[in-house]
Amino acid sequence: MKNMIFVVITLLLMSCTKDWCYEYGQRKEYDNQIKACTADIQSGQANPYISYTRRGVAYWRTGQYDQAIADCTTAIDLNQHYVLAYVNRGIAYTSKGQYDQAIADYNKAIDLDRFNDKTYVNRGNAYLKEKRYDQAIIDYTRAIDLNPNYDANYAYCGYAFLQKGQYDRAINDCTKAIELNPKNDEAFVNRGYSFLQKGQYDRAIDDFTQSIEVNPKYDLAYIKRGDAYSKKEQYDQAIADYTKAIELNTKYDVVYIIRGNIYAKKKLHDLAIADYNKAIELNPKNDSAYNNRGNEYREKKQYDQALADYTSAVQLNPENARAYNNRGNTYRFKEQYDLAIADYNKAIELNPQFNGAYYNLACTYSLQRNAALACTWLQRSIKAGYNDWKNMKTDSDLDNIRNLPCFKKLLAGR
């Protein structure tokens, strides 16, 4: 009888004991989860591969990707048929940008269990990171087949179609995701971005607004709505959205550049420069910020500051044809024509279709009173697609060739 009572009490105690290695994970208390799982591992419990996998997930959740990979690897060594260990190691590899290793783990997980839609989604995400969009779409489609009522599967597939430029198919999949879950803020953003790419700006704005209503802290929705307002030349609304995005994420250098570009369009040069300054502070290697700030200094006729910024831009990115062209313009304004010509030639070398650089060469040779080369480069600019006929007819830089037969012939009937 005493032995029977002891067994009953033991069973009751066991039933009251929580699995803290699991429980802390459910509570999102990951540091405590790591400690609890470590205690389980050290206690010599049965099935330690489960505790290693759970601890690996906790390490991943706290950004400790190498430890996550190590724990999942140990779990796999202990049980080579444990699917979750492969999946979670694959997720950790994805977070480290090691997509081939991640795909290999997802392949193994799928070999072991071909009916888990989330594994296909994870492999699709890795393919997406590698810009292997067709493979990603195949995996997302398989996930939809396995779980047709899960909105995220459609949203992922829609995003892959968006990246491929297949906007109608992206819209269809995002619409399905929204039908299944009207609170899927990412589906609204991706559908809105598809409308934006199709030039349907009002529909895009509606979707971005819906996304913001679902998630008022979704900075990307404000950025994209700002882009749509900018396309409609509603610059004040665009600035308001970019400002809100910056409030939500003060470390996003690109948004400062975008807002600076809008200030530049409004001729608010000092505000534009302030935004480019902030972008450079956040990311000193962003050549676009230097190039764009140079443009504003040039507009303010602060040519030396402009030259310094364009030089920084081409040092950071020697392939930046636009920065060479802009530096050439500044040298031209300073009447340093040989330096201007060298920069325009470099811009054309980098981008043979850069018709603006051809035109600027024509202007520079005209200023040098080299009529033959001025007409030659003007002809080349037109052949390359330069078609601002009003500017050609009024640009004072071309005054030295305006009355020549070559100029008249090029603009005949324009």
Image (cartoon, helix red, strand yellow):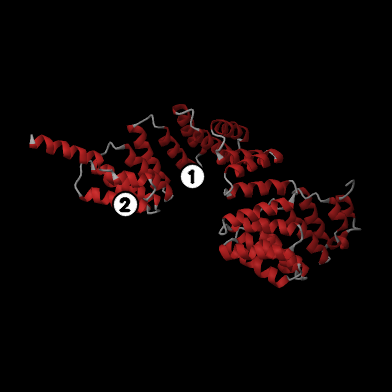
Mark 2 sits on what residue? 34
Q: CA distance from mark 2 to mark 1?
A: 29 Å
- Quadrant containing the N terminus is top left
Residue 387 appears anywhere in the view: yes
Q: Residue at x 72, y 66 (%)?
A: 270
Per the image, label 2 sits on a secondary structure element best described as: helix
Q: Residue at x 33, y 52 (%)?
A: 32
Seen in the image, is 140 located left or right of residue 195? Answer: left
Q: Is 151 situated above or below 261? A: above
* Residue situated in front as seen by the camera: 187 or 14: 14
Residue type of the residue flagged with mark 1: Lys
Per the image, label 1 sits on a secondary structure element best described as: helix
* Residue situated in front as seen by the camera: 372 or 413: 413
Mark 1 sits on what residue? 129
Please tell me which of labels 2 and 1 falls first in the chain.
2
Q: Are marks 2 and 1 in contact (CB under 8 Å)?
A: no
Q: Residue at x 48, y 37 (%)?
A: 136
Q: Position of residue 359 (x, y in %)?
A: 77, 56
Seen in the image, is 21 located left or right of residue 144? Answer: left
Q: Position of residue 237 (x, y in %)?
A: 71, 51
Q: Is 207 situated above or below 342? A: above
Q: Mark 1: give few (<14), some (14-19) or many (20+) Cα within 10 Å.
A: some
Q: Position of residue 107 (x, y in %)?
A: 37, 36
